[in-house]
Image (cartoon, helix red, strand yellow):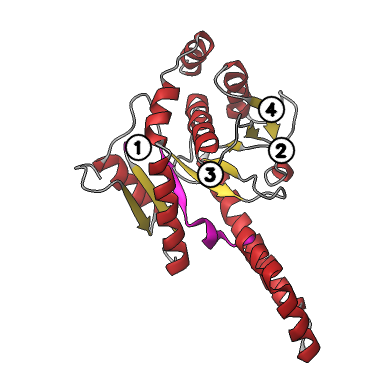
């Protein structure tokens, strides 16, 4: 990818090693302080997924990192997921502006002041899959826990559905009639259908998949990479990041104090 002989790289393995290799070989995009791993989650609203930034790249974040995550996530949501004006939320323990730890409070102020981000407020855990938000930002520590919990819930729900389907000949006939519906349920809930997560902020398209990924996951990871290439995600992130508004310049300065 660095030499231009490939347009993207798909890694199935340790996310930390993949991120380190991408940073070492590709480097960061100009103006991006830290990369983020963005994972796309289904929501209760069909055709309206949400991207979570970050799910494991940076566990200790500064407010300006989360502000950059919001910009990158908004670009991906708009140009790849098709959300006209992505709604951004900050994962927190309450809706009120004063809720949360120091990182959450300071990040809320940055996002609210940045005119390039359609920030609509804090998102509680129950809001993540509600369809109310198109982009949700958090540090990698919280995001990674959220990712693995959501994957586990999806697997549990699919297993419950399998166990509760009626048995016997009549049950098999009923299941056969429901097969198209069950297939769609699996596609919406199975994390393998999403292929992997995007490492946004590095100077190249990089997709990170589970080390235990099977053929369907790898196939979807490659599809994810192709979508990022086709929609010129890197170029659009660079263009949006350098559209500096006065509010953003001031907020970036204050976040470094």
Give the mark nearer the N terminus: 1 vs 2: 2
| Helix, strand or loop for disc 3 | helix
Q: Nearer the viewer, mark 3 or mark 1?
A: 1
**Which residue is labeled 3 in the image?**
141
Foreground tag (1 vs 2): 2
Tell me which label, 4 or 1, sits earlier in the chain: 4
Query: How far across and down, in percent of the image, does residue 146 sit?
Result: 60, 49
Of 28 and 50, nearer the camera is 50
Residue under numbered circle 2: 132
What residue is at 60 percent from the left and 26 percent from the top? 102
Residue contact at pointers 4 and 2, CB within 8 angstroms: no
Q: Name the secondary structure under disc 2.
A: loop
Residue 214 in sight here: no
Q: Which residues are magenta?
A: 189-203
Query: Who comes first in sequence, dot 4 or dot 3?
Result: 4
Residue 147, above or below 128: below
Residue 28 lies, in percent from the top left, at 32, 33
Q: Position of residue 101 (x, y in %)?
A: 63, 30
Q: For residue 202, which numbered disc appears in the image?
A: 1
Asked if the residue under mark 1 is in contact with the one under mark 3, i.e. CB atoms within 8 Å, the reply is no
The foreground one among 210 and 2 is 2
Magenta stretch encompasses residue 162: no
Mark 1: secondary structure:
loop
193 part of magenta stretch: yes
Q: Residue drawn at (59%, 59%), measured in percent from left and top?
A: 151
Disc on res. 121 = 4
Pair 3/2: label in front: 2
Q: Position of residue 191 (x, y in %)?
A: 56, 59
């Amino acid at each position: 990818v660095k030499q231009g002989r490939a347009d993207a790289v798909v890694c199935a393995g340790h996310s930390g090693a993949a991120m380190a290799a991408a940073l070492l070989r590709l480097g960061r995009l100009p103006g991006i302080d830290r990369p983020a791993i963005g994972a796309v989650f289904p929501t209760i609203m069909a055709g309206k997924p949400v991207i979570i930034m970050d799910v494991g790249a940076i566990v200790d974040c500064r407010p300006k990192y989360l502000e950059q995550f919001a910009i990158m996530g908004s670009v991906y949501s708009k140009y790849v997921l098709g959300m006209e004006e992505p709604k951004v939320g900050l994962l927190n323990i309450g809706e009120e502006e004063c809720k949360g730890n120091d990182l959450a409070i300071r990040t809320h102020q940055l996002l609210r002041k940045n005119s390039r981000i359609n920030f609509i407020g804090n998102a509680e855990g129950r809001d993540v899959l509600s369809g109310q938000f198109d982009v949700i930002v958090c540090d990698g520590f919280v995001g990674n826990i959220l990712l693995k919990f959501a994957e586990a819930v999806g697997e549990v729900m699919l297993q419950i559905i399998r166990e509760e389907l009626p048995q016997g000949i009549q049950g098999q006939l009923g299941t056969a009639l429901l097969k198209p519906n069950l297939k769609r349920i699996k596609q919406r809930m199975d994390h393998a259908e999403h292929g992997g997560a995007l490492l946004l902020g590095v100077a190249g398209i990089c997709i990170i998949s589970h080390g235990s990924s099977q053929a369907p996951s790898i196939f979807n990871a490659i599809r994810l990479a192709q979508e990022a290439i086709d929609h010129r995600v890197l170029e659009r992130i660079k263009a949006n990041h350098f559209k500096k508004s006065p509010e953003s310049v001031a907020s970036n300065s204050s976040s470094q104090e």
